Image (cartoon, grey):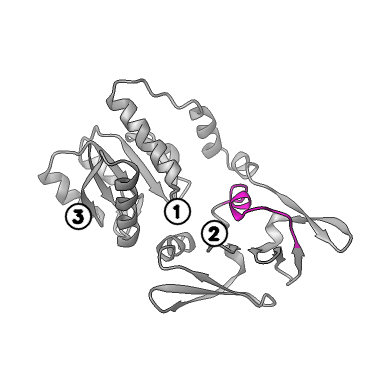
Amino acid sequence: MNAVIVEDESLIAEEMKANIAALAPDVQVIEMLPSLKAARKWFMNHAEPDLLFMDIRLSDGLSFELFDQFVLHCPVIFCTAYEEYAIRAFKVNGIDYLLKPVQEEDLKKAIDKVRNLKDGQRFVPGDLQQLVQYFSNPSLAKNQYKERFVINSGNKWAPVETKDIAVFYKDTLNYVYTFNGNRFIYDFSALEDIEDVLDPAIFFRANRQAIINIYSIQSVKPHGNQKLVVQLKHPLKLEIDISREKAPFFKKWMDR
């Protein structure tokens, strides 16, 4: 299958291309388009590919605008940092909707869906109704995430509201930092377990050690080789590193 990537962050586009090559050798990325303008020009001069990977918010507009100008029939895997376009995506050939940073397992499953369609197998997403309800009802969506954590406070347990947590930090022990600067031990085996139950609009997996709350950020500064350093608000005395690979995702996550 021939595929085209529409993505305005070059590092993300390159990573997507590399992941596709590793997970699906039969899918050849023939073009990476960095803007809506470039995509329009490309589709005016080329036949549509077998598969499209598309970001939604591009530097010069929404990728949905392509479907207003061109009649496209190929399936589309949307890869975006924004949840609010999901229903619209499924109205324009969307076969899957992956939230950034895209996990390899999710990417592989999405490509498998396309293969099933190409092979003539009927694909009906069993959770489509749940998806529609999820994005049509903000209060329902909110309830999908964990509302509080029970932490170890001295020799007793105490509940801490998720909204009051500034950072989850994995060190020799596992800690929860609250906005008032308190630090508590919280028992979890891996940050992935925590990440799965947090609202991705509010919390970001910064690195192997930390998940940070958007409202805990005081400032962000570049630090050599395109890395970023996040300074958290007082009274938190933490600096969190963002790797070169994650920096583009982090910028998009902040710029909502």
241, above or below 23, in the image: below
Using the rendered image of the protein, determine whether residue 85 is visible from the camera's viewpoint.
Answer: no
Asked if labels 2 and 1 touch by Cβ distance under 8 angstroms, the answer is yes
**Outermost residue toward the front in this view:** 172
Query: Dot 1: within a 10 Å radius of its alpha carbon, few (fewer than 14), some, or many (20 or more) residues?
Result: some
Query: Dot 2: within a 10 Å radius of its alpha carbon, few (fewer than 14), some, or many (20 or more) residues?
Result: many
Determine which of the numbered discs, if any, sits on residue 182 in the image: none
Residue under the point 64% across and 63% down: 170
Q: For the residue marked with disc 2, what is the amino acid?
A: Arg
Using the rendered image of the protein, determine whether residue 34 is visible from the camera's viewpoint.
Answer: yes
The span shown in magenta is 185-199
Q: Is residue 224 magenta?
A: no
Dominant SS in magenta: loop
Give coordinates of residue 63: x percent, y percent.
30, 48
112, above or below 141, in the image: above
Residue hosting label 3: 38
**Outermost residue toward the left in this view:** 45
Q: At numbered mark 1, what does the secondary structure look like: helix, strand or loop?
A: loop
- The residues bearing labels 3 and 1 have C-alpha atoms spaced at a distance of 24 Å
Query: In terms of depth relative to the viewer, which is nearer, 88 or 35?
Result: 35
Query: Dot 3: within a 10 Å radius of its alpha carbon, few (fewer than 14), some, or many (20 or more) residues?
Result: few
Asked if labels 2 and 3 touch by Cβ distance under 8 angstroms, the answer is no
- The residues bearing labels 1 and 2 have C-alpha atoms spaced at a distance of 9 Å
Residue hosting label 1: 101
**Outermost residue toward the right in this view:** 155
Query: In terms of depth relative to the viewer, which is nearer, 248 or 116?
Result: 116
Q: Earlier in the sequence, mark 1 or mark 2?
A: 1
- The residues bearing labels 3 and 2 have C-alpha atoms spaced at a distance of 31 Å
Q: At numbered mark 2, what does the secondary structure look like: helix, strand or loop?
A: strand
